[in-house]
Image (cartoon, rainbow, N blue to C red):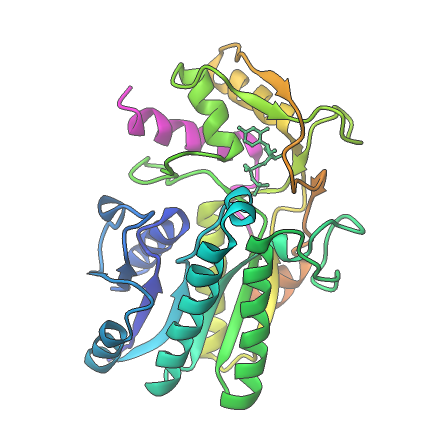
Amino acid sequence: MSKYIFVAGGAGYIGSHMILYLLEKGFEPIVYDNLSEGHREAVLGGIFIEGDLSDSEKLKSIFSSYQISTVMHFAASCYVGESVLNPRKYYKNNVFNTINLLNNMLDFNIDKFIFSSTCATYGNPLEIPITENHPQNPINPYGNTKLVIEKVLIDYSKAYNLKSISLRYFNAAGADFKARIGENHNPETHLIPNVIDAALGIKDNLKIFGNDYKTPDGTCIRDYIHVLDLAQAHFLAYKKLEEGYKTSFYNLGNGKGYSNKEIVNSVEKILGKKINFEYAPRREGDPPILIGSSEKAFKELGWKPEYYQIDKIVESAINWQIKLRGL
Ligand code: UDP
C-alpha cells in the first residue's frame, strides 16, 4: 500500500494547487489546515482535517492513524509588511508551529519533509540572478522565520536523519487553468491580483509603489512563477526524497523579471482596458530587483517550468479572479 502525503496548509493558495496536482497524479493526500487563511472549498479532494500545527494531540492522532511517507508544509504567514509590524505572529506560525510539526514527525519516524521557503531569505541581492550560493541575510522578520527553519532542517538532518528539501520560491502567481481555484487573500496585498481588481473595477485606488528605482522603467522587477510549476517542483522533490535523496535546497523562479509597470501593461493588453493607477512612495522592505537562477532545480530535480510566459500566468490569474468576484 502506498503511503500518504500530508499537506499542511493545503487549503491555501499554493497548497490547494499542490492538492490539485497530487489528485491529478492519482494520489489521495491528507490535507491539514486551520482555515485561518485557507478556504475549505479550495480543497478539491483528498482527506481534509481541520487543525492547527500547534495541536500536538491532533497531529499525533493523525500520524498514528495514517501511514505517512512525506510532509509538505505550506502553512505559514507570508506578508513581509505584516511581519515587520507583528513579528510575534510570524515567529509563532512559521517557527514555533513548524518545529512542533517536525518534532511530532520525528516521534512517528516520518523522515521526509518538503518546506516552502522563499527568496526573502536572501535579503537585498548582491548579484542578479540570485543563485543558491548567494548569502542569506533577510531584511524582514518573514525572511528570518523561513531561514530559521532552513537551519533547523540542516541540524535535524544531521542529528536525526530527517531528509528535507527546502524550495525557495520567487513570486508565486497565476491559477488553475480551469479557474476552479486561485489566489484569494483578504486583504489582498499582491501586485497581480490588485492590478486585475483595478482593471475589473473592483479596486479604484491602485498604487504602484516606487517609480524611482534603478530599473529601466523605474518600477521594481520580480520573477513570477506559475503556482502549478511550483506544484510540479514539489512533486519532483517528493520523488527525489523517495529515492533516498539527501537534504537540499533549491530556488524556484523563471529566471526572467518583469517590472510592476510591465504587469500593468500585461493585464491591460489581455483585458483590452486602460488601468488607472498612481505612483506612490516605495514600500518598505522591497528590493528593487529579484530574479532567481533555478539551474540547480533544473539539473538536480529535472524541473521544467511549463507556464513561464508572463501573459499566460497573468491570463490564468484574470480568469480565476473574474470567477472569484462573480463577474
Ligand atoms: N506592489 C505594488 N502595488 C500593489 C502591490 C504590490 O506596486 O498594490 C509592488 C510591490 O511594492 C513590489 C511588487 O509589486 O514591488 C511585488 O509585490 P508583491 O506584494 O506582489 O510580492 P513580493 O515581491 O512582496 O513578494
Q: Please provide percent x and percent y for residue 316.
A: 42, 33
Residue 11 higher or lower than 248, as above or below: above
Residue 260's quadrant in the figure? top right
Is residue 182 positioned above or below 136 on the image? above
Judging depth in this view, the residue of 217 and 272 nearest the camera is 217
Kindly identify the residue that appears in the image at 22 percent across and 44 percent down. 41
Seen in the image, is 239 located left or right of residue 159?
left
Count of all numbered marks drawn on residues in the image: 0
55 in the magenta segment = no
288 or 292: nearer the viewer = 288
Quarter holding the C terminus is top left
Image quadrant in which you'd find residue 81? top right
Side of 146 where 31 appears, left or right: left
- At a point 41% along the width and 64% down the height, the residue shown is 73
Q: Is residue 268 left or right of residue 111?
A: right
Q: Residue at x 26, y 80 (%)?
A: 67
Instruction: Pick the quarter of the image with the N terminus.
Output: bottom left
Which residues are the magenta region? 305-327
Front-most of residues 101 and 96: 96
| Residue furthest bottom in the image | 159
Task: Decide if residue 252 is on the left or right side of residue 182.
Answer: right
Instruction: Report if residue 238 is visible in the image.
Output: no
How far across and how far down the image is residue 33, in percent?
29, 58
Q: Give the prevailing secondary structure in the magenta stretch.
A: helix
Q: Is residue 316 magenta?
A: yes
| Whole-percent x, y for residue 264 in the image | 57, 22
Where is residue 278 drawn, in percent x and y? 60, 15
Ligand 1's quadrant is top right
Q: Is residue 153 visible?
A: yes
Residue 101 vertical position relative to residue 136 in the rendered view, above or below: below
